[in-house]
């Protein structure tokens, strides 16, 4: 690593620490819950920044999506540019950039990501390193996290009118999906034509794709202790498969309610392999304070 690269690393790390401190301040002052405060911050940011293909409303929407999210679930990541080419330029590492974006799209945990209780999120390198010394396993010998391991996810419920739900019946009891679909519709959800699920499930399960956590949490709040599983290919639709434990549909939690849900990672979405030389700072990092 060259001296210039070392200097860049230090500069980037300081920038990340500053941004994490700023973010914690915004969270502590509940800026993201106040539209007027959020607009003031966004307008101040735009005056001193240059962004491409991003509108003021996009930044406000981004700020509102952070409502109820703890700082530990936000991570600042920078990919080193690599070696300088013959013209003195540092070409971007497009393959590593693609891997990072794939991890974000798939909602894979990023390095140093933490739960609300400051424990490492399952699937991060830190979670493997936290194996108890007396367990007989070292960090290097500990098994990799299962692709179906549960993780605690912070989410904020949204308006049922903004959620599209597909109800499927795995119980074999005729008309059950239609009844549940009608009840969900009465609570304001957009409901597609109900259908049958191929095979029985013991637990009522909510399936959703990465990025649709708010919608999934809203749907799940209308059921009693459902299993929540993240899979690929669902798009904006949340699928509820009624299991043998299904009893009734309740009113969902009010829009804007912070909730914590245990999410299972579906076997169809294995973790993305990230480069090992990322510059990473978790927003809960208080190193500079």
Image (tube, helix red, strand yellow):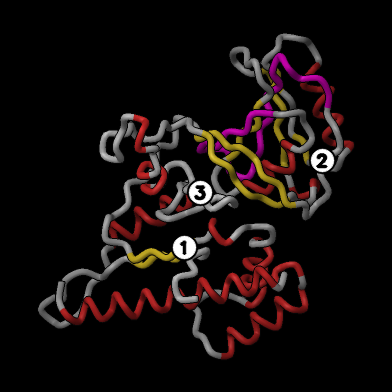
Q: Residue at x 32, y 65 (%)?
A: 79
In this rendering, the count of numbered labels is 3
Distance (Cα) linking label 1 and label 2 = 32 Å
Front residue (pair 151, 236)? 151
Distance (Cα) linking label 3 and label 1 = 12 Å
Residue 196: mark:
none
Specify the farthest residue to the right: 186
Are circles 3 and 1 on residues that touch, CB within 8 Å? no
Q: Helix, strand or loop at disc 3? A: loop
Number of residues whose C-alpha sits closer than 10 Å to that of mark 2, classed few (under 14), some (14–19) or many (20 or more): many
Q: Is residue 10 left or right of residue 20?
A: left
Number of residues whose C-alpha sits closer than 10 Å to that of mark 3, classed few (under 14), some (14–19) or many (20 or more): some
Front residue (pair 273, 143)? 143
Distance (Cα) linking label 3 and label 2 = 29 Å
Which image quarter: residue 267? top left
Q: Give the residue number, with chain letter if any, for mark 1.
A: 282
Region in magenta: 226-248
Residue 182 in the image: above or below residue 218: above
Residue 138 in the image: above or below residue 119: above
Task: Identify the mark nearer the N-term, 1 or 2.
Answer: 2
Q: Residue at x 70, y 18 (%)?
A: 169
Which image quarter: residue 272? top left
Specify whether residue 246 is painted magenta.
yes
- Point out the frontmost of discs 1 and 2: 1
Q: Give the residue number, with chain letter if any, for mark 2.
A: 252
Q: Give the residue number, with chain letter if any, for mark 3.
A: 119
């Amino acid at each position: 690593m060259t001296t210039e690269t070392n200097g860049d690393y230090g500069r980037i790390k300081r920038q990340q620490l500053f941004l994490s401190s700023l973010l914690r301040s915004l969270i502590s002052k509940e800026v993201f819950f106040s539209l007027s405060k959020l607009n003031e911050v966004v307008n101040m940011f735009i005056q001193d920044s240059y962004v491409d293909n991003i509108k003021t409303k996009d930044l406000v929407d981004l700020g509102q999506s952070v409502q109820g999210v703890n700082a530990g679930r936000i991570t600042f990541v920078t990919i080193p540019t690599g070696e300088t080419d013959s013209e003195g330029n540092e070409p971007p590492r497009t393959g590593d950039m693609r891997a990072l974006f794939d991890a974000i799209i798939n909602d894979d945990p990023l390095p140093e990501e933490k739960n609300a209780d400051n424990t490492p999120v399952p699937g991060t390198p830190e979670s493997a390193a936290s194996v108890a010394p007396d367990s007989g396993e070292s960090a290097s010998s500990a098994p990799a996290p299962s692709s179906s391991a549960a993780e605690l996810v912070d989410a904020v419920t949204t308006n049922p009118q903004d959620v599209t739900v597909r109800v499927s019946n795995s119980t074999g009891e005729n008309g059950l999906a239609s009844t549940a679909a009608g009840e969900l519709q009465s609570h304001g959800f957009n409901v597609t034509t109900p259908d049958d699920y191929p095979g029985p499930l013991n637990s009522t399960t909510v399936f959703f794709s990465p990025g649709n956590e708010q919608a999934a949490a809203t749907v799940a709040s209308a059921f009693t202790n459902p299993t929540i599983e993240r899979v690929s290919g669902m798009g904006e639709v949340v699928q509820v498969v009624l299991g043998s434990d299904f009893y009734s549909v309740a009113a969902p939690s009010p829009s804007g309610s912070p909730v914590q849900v245990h999410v299972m990672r579906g076997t169809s979405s294995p973790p993305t392999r990230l480069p090992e030389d990322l510059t990473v700072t978790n927003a809960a990092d208080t190193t500079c304070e």
